Amino acid sequence: MLPIKHCFSLPADTVYLDGNSLGPLPVHAQENLSRVLQQEWGQHLIQGWNLDGWMEQPARLGNTLAPIIGAEPNTVMLGDTLSIKVFQALSAALGLRPERRVILSDSGNFPTDLYMAEGLIHGLQQDYELKVVEPDAIEAAIDDSIAVVMLTHVDYCTGRMHDMDRITQATHQAGAVSLWDLAHSAGAVDIDVSQCRCEFAVGCTYKYLNAGPGAPAFIYARPDIADKIEPILSGWLGHDKPFAFERKYRAGESVERFRVGTPPVLQMAVLESALALWQGLSMAEVRKRSIELSELFIEGVESRCPMLDLASPRDAQQRGSQVSFAFEHGYAAMQALIANNVIGDFRQPNLMRFGFTPLYLDEKDIERAVDILSDVMTNRLWNKPEFQKVKAVT
Amino acid sequence: MLPIKHCFSLPADTVYLDGNSLGPLPVHAQENLSRVLQQEWGQHLIQGWNLDGWMEQPARLGNTLAPIIGAEPNTVMLGDTLSIKVFQALSAALGLRPERRVILSDSGNFPTDLYMAEGLIHGLQQDYELKVVEPDAIEAAIDDSIAVVMLTHVDYCTGRMHDMDRITQATHQAGAVSLWDLAHSAGAVDIDVSQCRCEFAVGCTYKYLNAGPGAPAFIYARPDIADKIEPILSGWLGHDKPFAFERKYRAGESVERFRVGTPPVLQMAVLESALALWQGLSMAEVRKRSIELSELFIEGVESRCPMLDLASPRDAQQRGSQVSFAFEHGYAAMQALIANNVIGDFRQPNLMRFGFTPLYLDEKDIERAVDILSDVMTNRLWNKPEFQKVKAVT
């Protein structure tokens, strides 16, 4: 039953609407991390790799995460950062369509996905092309020149959500490979990569999955194609027998080949605590509550703050778990809101962004957030000089 | 003054001779990590990126690490794993010599370095070649066909150490680029990348630098060439203005461009505690003590365990901070030794490996280790069935 607010360590009197950027601290993380630090690393030292299962942890946690995105067992691997996982999946996808030369994406993709594609193309030194169209032009742009369609499912600015099943079908009809970035989807909306039949999915665990700043990323590869991949990032822990120290690389079985270097054991410990909270939760229920809370927020803001314009799709079925409003003085208004303990964030040029994470939010939080936002807007609190100074926020 | 044993949390009655694989827990790490967890993440949430300097930490800790390897300020960046950093440096090195096609390395290199080179070459789909020679044949193999000479400074099996200055000079005389893997050197021997003039150096922080399992890796780029690199792993945090969310990648200044994705803030917190221990230590003093302890160990073992054959160079100037002995039943003998609280490790086919880390070892530890090893050998303790069962150890 939601919410499970008591499982998170949240500051007093704060309504946290930024779990789409960084989820809050799970209460049990400290205890688990201290145990790993003191008992495992401190006492077992090098033997921790065997005694405490550090080496198998990225695959084991992959299996814990799998149901949240509808993945089969042994198809998800944790590690590295999302940018690296994009690079792995994208290079693998190109390898599956060696005769094609176009990567198709859209302008709603998060910049690092496009940057990693640019870097890969630069590295390949061949006539590859990154074609970037507007989000609503994606389906029309899918043709048999396309090697891979690489999209972020939920837009980081507006929360606009692609139809994953339909676009993947169109991708496959054109003979192309489908790669989804689930950064703003995993733990936010009910997705089913297995049913969707996309070849690759990647995502991060520090947003809706609450695994902390810099938590490891994940990669999913459809089981029937995983063994066909010849990894470019062919690190030793993706080798079939890492501790045989063979001279030549031989890719490990299935998704094991997406491991690269030594896993971040301490971040993994926190991830383990964070994923444990999803045991027994239904993604359908999480999604239902997220829509209820988002709709309540939109209704409240639109009725009480007429100077804010909804920048997200009005239809909840076309939104992820975040809502953005456009406002000329959005940056300063968000600072004023934060100073009053309602935490969202700001995205250029004028978007006030709010994430709805039903694990620790309920109707009272939403009502309070609307009250305070209404106060900020009605009393023009953004005009105060202390809220004008621009700082970068991730 | 060495040792600073009180700064580490070591199990009672244990002589830890495996800091070359995983360094022990710094005492202050727990306190620092708990503060980051509870005060920073727990209380500041998303604002931690600004309020607590998370975003600048990889560069700031790069500057803390720099003196340990003789690097100038603003030339070292933390992040990712060593395998990824090898890939970054190697692809950058090839980019500096676009007309050359050969990567030269040796059979003493750690497998992941060779694997990453294989993967890169596979990805480039061009006529690149990885040429691997025996360690003592490296200098003769450097000619003007070579784009980059990629070597691990200290051999992970035997501790054999290359002459970094001489090989780098030969590399430059042939017009090639020099890339050093300092995994077994940083914090172990006194090196000076600035004086050596190598273009790139990479390394890890979980061995002699004691930053914990899966701690971030580092990359050094010589300041006069850093700005010439067009990164293949062009992640958003290496962008000149990550939070402008521009459509096109523009590499950040100097070594900033070797950042990729979101940094592992919790692992960084432990790294910070670990690097703090080096304040005031002289690498010349660390190296001197490491040689004294290693020589004492070799002398003791050779006089009391005649069935063990020294597999490391006898000349301390040609060794890093580890010593290996060959023994037919080396695996079982190492298990017996570990069961008696002297912790080293085993490497195929027959090497018993011991690391000497003067930060927490003194003469008494060495004498005790020799006593117990002598007991294991003299009384053939390796014959016990419980020591025969093979387990992989990293």
Image (cartoon, coloured by chain):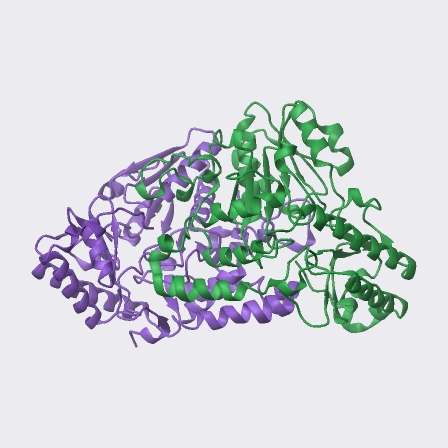
Chain colours: A purple, B green
Q: Is residue B252 left or right of residue B369?
A: left
State the residue in front, B190 or B78: B190
State the residue in front, A118 or B198: B198
Q: Quadrant of residue A343?
A: bottom left
Image coords of residue A238 (percent x, y): 57, 52
State the residue in front, A227 or B272: B272
Q: How many marks?
A: 0
Figure check: A33 above or below B287: below
Q: In this view, does B98 lie to the left or right of B159?
A: left
For the question of whether residue B83 can be seen, the reply is: no
State the residue in front, A219 or A47: A47
For the question of whether residue B40 can be seen, the reply is: yes
Image coords of residue B17 (percent x, y): 73, 60
Image coords of residue A200 (percent x, y): 41, 51
Figure check: A76 above or below A28: above
Image coords of residue A276 (percent x, y): 43, 71
Figure check: B75 above or below B44: above
